[in-house]
Amino acid sequence: MVFKNTQVFRNGVFSRSDVSVSLGGGVSPIGVDASSFVILPGFVDVHVHLREPGFSYKETIRSGSLAAAHGGYTVVCAMPNLNPVPDSLENLRPELDAIEKDAVVRVLPYGAITQGEKGEMLADLEAMAPYVVAFSDDGKGVQNPDRMREAMKRAKALGKLIVAHCEDNSLLHGGYIHDGAYAKAHGHRGICSESEWRPIQRDLELVRETGCGYHVCHISTKESVALIRKAKAEGLNVTCETGPHYLLLDDSMLEEDGRFKMNPPIRGKADREALLEGLADGTIDMIATDHAPHSPEEKSRGLEKSAMGIVGLETAFSLVYTGLVKTGIISMNRLMELLHDNPCRRFGIPQNTGFTVFDLNSTYQIDPADFLSAGKATPFTGWNVKGRCLLTSTGETIAWYDADRLPKGETL
């Protein structure tokens, strides 16, 4: 298939050209009018939960990587809250085997920081280092500062990042949504912002001490933005991510539905504004989905009792393109930095991640029935967005394409 007169994004600029893509099975090339299409570098998500091994009723390597391709992602980094927890080479092996067997895009696993993600004894970082993208206990914060200091020293010696889920358990008090106006008005127990920013503050002191490369997961509060901005100004080796839901929602938009429940929670308006400022000024380095699928039953128990986590791989680009690029908050160049350039640079991923084809003129309504992920819970159901993914290629193979919406074209 030859995409005629399509826009190709290379090195920060768009240029028009004809691009050939092999979909297999044919002999004669097909030419299609692709003037409304854009070809973008394959996106990179440094924070996804693929649930296998251990929780395949929520998601599998196969379904999760297909969802990634459906959203334009060609590289995803899989978090270690699995069973077994990948805290040794032996316990990492089942995940590596499943990736080799079933992944349709590149899946890079994390190794755990501590054994069983229990925050006590450190995992076998040295044995796992050649096989993992970085170390994280995501889903749980490392509560003990001495344990985190030791982990940072060992990770630095191995040339690996510590990727931190920052959450102080002593400040949670049974909360499950943001401790803001909505929680107070509706009688919900709140999670205070300090439970996130206080561990960041602690860890930044440890980074100053150890010099370890440090990346903060899913920041959601204005204080977190300020701390990281200050740390960067001081030259500390720190980066961070946030998710589309924190950029596009605040707690005034919550509904009594489990699809609005995730950790950290959707925060207040001032937090969202601070995140947008951090996105624009470079404090926030990348957008990650924290794609966290659960079964329908686990997400059907309301705000209080549903499992924490939403899916995001298949909606992230269209949501951010519609909500932030089309509205002039950030540029398309900046979006590509957030979805591709910066994740590659920070995590040591080769920049040649393949490509994805989007029709930016296509408007559609988000419907979880269209998702390839086994998880369907999203707060964005019913939102109208622009930008539909038509094809995703790893550069070696076509990971996914929309046979129904790609133009039929004419034989050349």
Image (cartoon, helix red, strand yellow):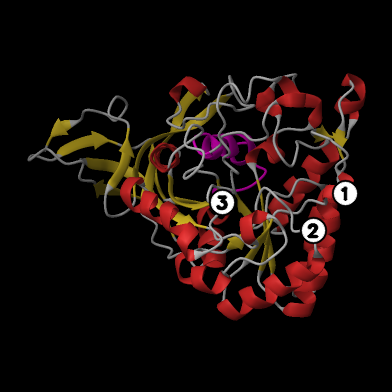
**Residue 365 against residue 224 in the figure, above or below:** above
Residue on which the image places disc 2: 143
- Distance CA(mark 2)–CA(mark 1): 9 Å
| Residue corresponding to mark 3 | 79
- Give the residue type that dot 1 points to: Ser
Q: What stretch is highlighted in magenta?
A: 313-332
Badge 2 or badge 3: first in the primary sequence: 3
Q: Can residue 142 be seen in this view?
A: yes
Q: How far from the left and from the top, in percent, is residue 191?
A: 84, 39
Task: State yes or no: discs 2 and 1 in contact (Cβ < 8 Å).
Answer: yes
Q: In the displayed structure, does residue 13 sit left or right of residue 244?
A: left
Report the side of 64 relative to 124 (left or right).
Answer: left
| Quarter of the figure with the C terminus | top left
Disc nearer the start of the sequence (3/1): 3
Left or right: 1 with respect to 143?
left
Residue 393 falls left or right of residue 293: left
Write down the residue under mark 1: 170
Local secondary structure at mark 3: loop
